[in-house]
């Protein structure tokens, strides 16, 4: 029997107070465990890199509204700053989600972020797989963060697919390998969260890969949801609207139920 999936949803990047206020309202209407409030955005090419420290008040605003915030941290300094800022404002039983992105494959940085996260049981750390295909490396990421003293109970493993090599007939932004993800889940005992946004790359593909992922024993999803994707500052093509989020969750639930019958 599957437990309730972990749902991490919200804009690709925090852009303004108005945007995050809308996201908070929408998240509170739904069964969202963590709202994305990303302040730092690694970029393949120069572009909007996030609000940075100027957006810390948006994390506080989210926590004070009783919604658990989540965001990517690139450097240990980011993790320390966010923890110091947000933790005093969490509601009872509140959580803070930090994650290490696919581009961040410096094991020293990974361990230091994990060491900081391990200081407070209210902090959940998620690690994303690296861009290239390697089960050994992916398992190594988990090993590095656990070696820093982080509890498995506070760790999530995120599958966001692997960068295509050569031709890409599927048209996906990144290619998932759910069998590898399930193998790593079994060997490490760490729950697996699926990222249909960075795998799909556009809205139709996001729906397609999310439905396929429902056939596997995933523990939740992290998905980009924006109230006005056409005017988003990052990842316009792959962000869905909140009504589309409802449709996707219904589709995934029906798919999972059909597999269990």
Image: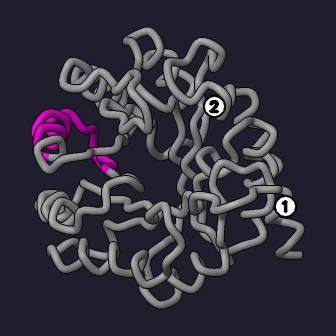
Residue 85 picture quarter: top left
Query: Residue 163: image x %, image y %?
Result: 57, 58
Q: Residues within 10 Å of mark 2 (few under 14, many from 20)?
A: many
Please state which of residues 40 and 45 is positioned toward the viewer in this rendering: 45
* Lateral position of residue 14 relative to residue 133, left or right: left
Q: Is residue 88 magenta?
A: yes
Which residue is most to the top? 18
Q: Quadrant of the N terminus?
A: bottom right
Q: Quadrant of the C terminus?
A: bottom right
Q: Which residue is mark 2?
A: 239
The answer to whether residue 34 of the structure is visible from this angle is yes
Query: Residue 82: image x %, image y %?
Result: 18, 38
Query: Residue 15: image x %, image y %?
Result: 41, 17
Q: How many marks?
A: 2
> For residue 255, which numbered disc appears in the image?
1
* Lateral position of residue 13 relative to residue 244, left or right: left
Residue at 15%, 73% (x, y): give it.
148
Please provide the residue range marked out in magenta. Answer: 80-98
Residue 160 picture quarter: bottom right
């Amino acid at each position: 029997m599957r437990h309730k999936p972990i749902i991490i949803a919200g804009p690709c990047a925090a852009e303004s107070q108005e945007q995050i206020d809308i996201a908070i309202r929408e998240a509170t209407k739904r069964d969202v465990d963590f709202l994305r409030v990303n302040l730092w955005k690694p970029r393949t090419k120069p572009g909007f890199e996030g609000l940075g420290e100027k957006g810390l008040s948006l994390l506080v605003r989210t926590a004070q509204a009783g919604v658990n915030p989540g965001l990517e941290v690139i450097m240990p300094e980011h993790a320390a700053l966010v923890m110091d800022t947000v933790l005093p404002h969490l509601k009872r039983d509140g959580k803070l989600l930090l994650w290490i992105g696919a581009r961040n494959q410096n094991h020293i940085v990974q361990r230091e972020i994990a060491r900081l996260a391990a200081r407070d049981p209210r902090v959940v750390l998620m690690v994303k797989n690296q861009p290239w295909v390697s089960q050994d490396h992916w398992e190594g990421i988990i090993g590095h963060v656990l070696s820093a003293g982080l509890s498995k109970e506070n760790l999530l493993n995120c599958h966001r697919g692997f960068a295509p090599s050569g031709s890409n007939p599927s048209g996906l932004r990144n290619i998932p390998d759910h069998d590898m993800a399930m193998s790593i889940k079994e060997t490490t005992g760490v729950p697996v969260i699926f990222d249909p946004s960075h795998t799909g790359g556009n809205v139709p593909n996001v729906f397609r890969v999310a439905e396929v992922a429902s056939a596997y024993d995933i523990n939740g999803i992290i998905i980009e949801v924006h109230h006005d994707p056409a005017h988003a500052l990052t990842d316009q093509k792959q962000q869905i609207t909140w009504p589309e989020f409802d449709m996707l969750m219904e589709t995934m639930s029906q798919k999972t139920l059909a597999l269990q019958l």
